[in-house]
């Protein structure tokens, strides 16, 4: 799939405020500073469609981007960001859970995992929650250019092994590097396949 157009639609504080035009939606979520904005820019081939920041917690609403006038990328706030109040953290959690559980046009959520570090409990717990809630999702390992290939492979294998403690089979997985432009084509092909299937039901 080639991304020909990509536009920011708006930021929405709750799922009830989000667009209602029934386009397929693909949510992107992960720990704060995992590289969501860089990945969105890579997928859309736009340098500043999603604003990147070294400061965690920049995304605070449900950010919608319409792609090829046919489907949405939805950038969700990062989880696990400690430097906010407990009240704000709860608000974000309600917003994220509300969107993921109630949004009928959500096709799949992409959970972003930093490929440079060992498995983190917060990521495992979030993925297990997604499974319990029966929310379709895939995993994207990010920043694959930051470490040596054997270290990246070892971290991914360790993460998979950790997941298999609770899962019988693993969801689709992708490895990406925004700097090296790695992984975008496979993800876009995956999204295109889902879009083609979803057209049969609308």
Image: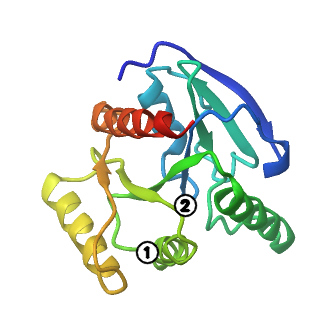
* Residue that label 1 marks: 120
Look at 22% across and 58% down and name the residue there. Answer: 152
* Residue that label 2 marks: 31
User: How far is the residue under mark 1 from the one under mark 2?
Assistant: 10 Å
Closer-to-camera residue (202/36): 202
Q: Residues within 10 Å of mark 1 (few under 14, many from 20)?
A: few
Q: Residues within 10 Å of mark 2 (few under 14, many from 20)?
A: many
Look at 53% across and 70% down and name the residue there. Answer: 134
Closer-to-camera residue (131/6): 131
Q: Is residue 143 above or below residue 81?
A: above
**Residue 51 lies in quadrant:** top right
Q: Work out whether mark 1 precedes mark 2 in sequence or the reverse, and give the earlier one.
A: 2
Closer-to-camera residue (179/97): 97
Q: Residue furthest top?
A: 4
The quarter of the picture where the N terminus appears is: top left
Q: Is residue 41 visible?
A: yes
């Amino acid at each position: 799939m080639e991304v020909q157009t990509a536009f920011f639609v708006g930021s929405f504080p709750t799922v009830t405020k989000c667009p209602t035009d029934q386009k397929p939606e693909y949510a992107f979520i992960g720990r704060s500073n995992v590289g969501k904005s860089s990945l969105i820019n890579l997928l859309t081939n736009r340098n500043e469609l999603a604003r990147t920041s070294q400061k965690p917690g920049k995304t605070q609403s449900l950010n919608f981007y319409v792609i090829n006038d046919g489907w949405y990328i939805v950038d969700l706030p990062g989880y696990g960001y400690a430097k906010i109040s407990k009240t704000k953290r709860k608000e974000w959690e309600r917003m994220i859970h509300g969107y993921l559980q109630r949004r009928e046009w959500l096709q799949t959520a992409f959970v972003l995992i930093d490929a440079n570090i060992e498995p983190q409990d917060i990521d495992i717990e979030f993925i297990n929650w997604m499974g319990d809630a029966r929310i379709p999702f895939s995993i994207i390992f990010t920043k694959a250019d930051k470490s040596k290939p054997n270290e990246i492979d070892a971290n991914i294998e360790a993460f998979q092994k950790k997941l298999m403690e609770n899962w019988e089979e693993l969801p689709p997985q992708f490895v990406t590097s925004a700097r090296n432009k790695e992984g975008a084509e496979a993800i876009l092909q995956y999204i295109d396949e889902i879009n083609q299937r979803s057209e049969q039901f609308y």
